[in-house]
Amino acid sequence: MRLAGPVFIDEQELEPDRWIAAHQSAGYRAALCPVGHEADDQTVATYRQAAARADLLIAEVGAWSNPISPDEGTRKQAIDHCIRRLELADRIGARCCVNIAGSRGEQWDGPHADNFSDDTFALIVDTVRLIIDQVNPSQTFFTLETMPWIVPDSADSYLALIQAIDRASFAVHFDPVNMIASPRTYYANGAMIRDFVRRLGPHIKNCHAKDIRIGSQLTVHLEEVIPGTGALDYRTFLQELSGLDPDTPLILEHLQSEADYRQAADYVRRTARELSIEV
């Protein structure tokens, strides 16, 4: 697998050689997409070629938006955003374009009573088909990040989506922390990871690396923390990912500082070395 994470470059100084050097300095072998969908073809090609020369894999293009919003204007805008971002992922040769399914509530990534309804499932299916069919990507995949309060939230629901969407360009984005929504899963997360990879491994194009810690106050409090400071079974996580495509990216995210990312990367690398796994 290939470890990735944000690099800290001033936007005014962003250019291919500096971008490559920042990833090499951080020890990353994969990267987030460095340009927006408004970038012209020459700029996209320049970054794509620079990445290829440096053996730096562009892991994902984020399409963060709410394409199942109950507000029709917001929904249409989000669908257009996903289309533009999937086009960019195809142009720049990213492993995937990723969004969450969205939410039927006002908060684009929040819980809502209708999120697990049959009608919402059907809406997600229709929306993903629309996005993929509009672009018809040839070099990338559209994926939905696993989440705790919207499908896909489990191996079962992801398999159901794959079957219902029925598009070769729909694939899997695996974030195990986002699937831990109960103490039962929290304390057995290694088994959850093994089951997910066993059933969906060939479809996994990208992964996020986080960690999670449970609190002791009622009712249930689950907190996202720096990798290595929580309870995610990283030995199992890395062992399972090591059996997939060796180019599968593992992206560190949601941390507060460059020092936090160094700490997280050091932990992942140290654990991987103990298992004789290259990241």
Image (spheres, helix red, strand yellow):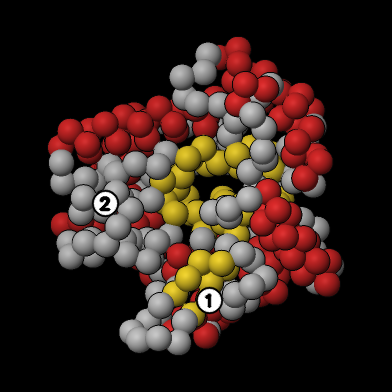
Element at label 2:
loop
Position of the C terminus by quadrant: bottom right
Position of the N terminus by quadrant: bottom right
Element at label 1:
strand
Query: Picture coordinates of residue 141 (x, y %)?
Result: 49, 41
In the drawing, what numbered circle is on residue 113? none
Residue 52, can we see it?
no
Mark 2: give few (<14), some (14-19) or many (20+) Cα within 10 Å.
few
Residue type, mark 1 in image: Arg
Q: Which residue is mark 2?
A: 107
Q: Is residue 24 left or right of residue 90?
A: right
Q: Residue at x 60, y 39 (%)?
A: 32
In the drawing, what numbered circle is on residue 213? 1
Query: Picture coordinates of residue 143 (x, y %)?
Result: 45, 47
Q: Is residue 133 or residue 235 the one in the foreground?
A: 235
Query: Picture coordinates of residue 203 (x, y %)?
Result: 52, 55
Q: In which quadrant of the rendered view does residue 227 lie? A: bottom right
Query: Picture coordinates of residue 58 (x, y %)?
Result: 64, 37
Q: Is residue 104 left or right of residue 46?
A: left
Q: What is the C-alpha distance between the residues marked 2 and 1?
A: 24 Å
Residue type, mark 2 in image: Gln
Q: How many marks?
A: 2
Q: Residue at x 71, y 30 (%)?
A: 19
* Upstream in sequence: badge 2 or badge 1: 2
